Image: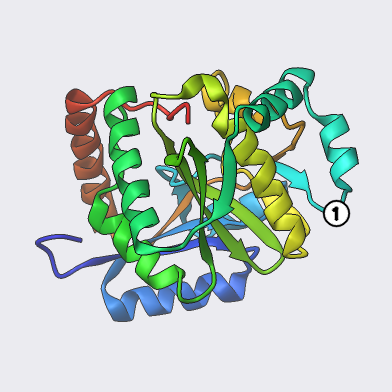
């Protein structure tokens, strides 16, 4: 936590909580001056786990990820998947192909720099608060060599117009970040990009594609729905309180977000 000797812990996309795990987290937190541990278990919502969290002193916290997401079954054949898509989605995929849009994996430095510029362009265009370039560079430098992060780019007339970062972890494919230019939006590069991301996951032998979040009424949610994914709900975000200082931290956090909202309208990007 900036300007203090204290820390905040996090266990994101972790296992189902148990009494033993929570007990060990509390011990470690006390030793390391951690005032709370943010938990977002990669576990479907269930009453037993929620009761354990509440009984252990955890409270609902500010979420890092949406509690619901979309999953696509990558074990299905390409024909099965295409047949399940909305007709407009299939049309847009074919349109992008007909227009000459191509999608490839490109993990080069130049492609990543283009991804950063597209992210900045998308954030300005849609008025949302994006992670800094420093954050994205650190993420890429750590996860690309580990074989976790992959960059897919869509090109039109030789220019990268859409760039997505995908994560590969165990038998899951994740779609956390994406950006595109508004210059050629009518060639439907994002529709083809999603289809090629699905094919990318299948080629790697992965079982599931997690589209990384679902928010009711958002444009990008409607875009994802065109691929007929399954909706699942997780346990959500919980703060395991390990110090009374948590309440002061929470107040300051709310104040910080109020200031950020005053500077920039917080919305989910369309693409």
Residue 192: % across, % down = 64, 36
Q: Is residue 167 left or right of residue 231?
A: left
**Residue 214 occupies quadrant:** top right
Q: Is residue 264 left or right of residue 190?
A: left
Residue at screen point 53% across, 39% down: 66
Q: Nearer the viewer, residue 109 or 100?
A: 100
Residue at screen point 67% across, 45% down: 196
- Residue 69 visible in the picture: no
41 w.r.t. 32: above or below: above
Residue at screen point 44% across, 43% down: 63
The residue that mark 1 highlights is 75
Residue 47: % across, % down = 71, 47
Residue 253: % across, % down = 24, 43
Residue 130: % across, % down = 31, 40
Q: Nearer the viewer, residue 63 or 59?
A: 63
Q: Nearer the viewer, residue 113 or 134?
A: 113
226 w.r.t. 51: above or below: above
**Quadrant of the image for the N terminus?**
bottom left
Q: Residues within 10 Å of mark 1 (few under 14, many from 20)?
A: some
- Residue 187 visible in the picture: yes
Residue at screen point 43% across, 29% down: 268
């Amino acid at each position: 936590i900036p300007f203090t000797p204290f820390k905040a812990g996090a266990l994101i996309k972790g296992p189902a909580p148990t009494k033993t795990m929570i007990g060990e987290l509390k011990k470690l937190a006390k030793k390391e001056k951690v005032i709370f541990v943010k938990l977002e278990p990669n576990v479907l919502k269930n009453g037993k786990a929620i009761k354990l969290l509440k009984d252990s002193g955890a409270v609902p916290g500010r979420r890092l990820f949406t509690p619901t997401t979309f999953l696509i079954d990558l074990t299905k054949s390409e024909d099965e998947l295409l047949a399940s898509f909305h007709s407009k989605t299939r049309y847009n995929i074919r349109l992008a192909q007909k227009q000459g849009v191509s999608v490839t994996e490109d993990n080069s430095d130049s492609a990543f720099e283009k991804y950063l510029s597209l992210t900045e362009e998308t954030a300005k265009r849609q008025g949302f608060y994006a992670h800094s370039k420093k954050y994205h560079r650190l993420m890429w430098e750590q996860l690309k060599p580990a074989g976790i992060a992959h960059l897919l780019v869509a090109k039109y007339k030789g220019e990268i117009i859409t760039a997505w970062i995908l994560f590969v972890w165990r038998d899951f494919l994740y779609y956390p970040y994406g950006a595109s230019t508004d210059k050629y939006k009518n060639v439907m590069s994002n529709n083809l990009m999603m289809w090629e991301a699905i094919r990318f996951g299948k080629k790697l032998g992965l079982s599931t594609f997690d589209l990384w979040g679902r928010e009711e009424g958002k444009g990008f949610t409607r875009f994802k729905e065109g691929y007929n994914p399954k909706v699942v709900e997780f346990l959500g975000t919980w703060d395991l309180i390990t110090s009374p200082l948590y309440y002061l931290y929470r107040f300051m956090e709310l104040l910080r977000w109020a200031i950020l909202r005053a500077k920039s309208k917080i919305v989910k990007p369309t693409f």
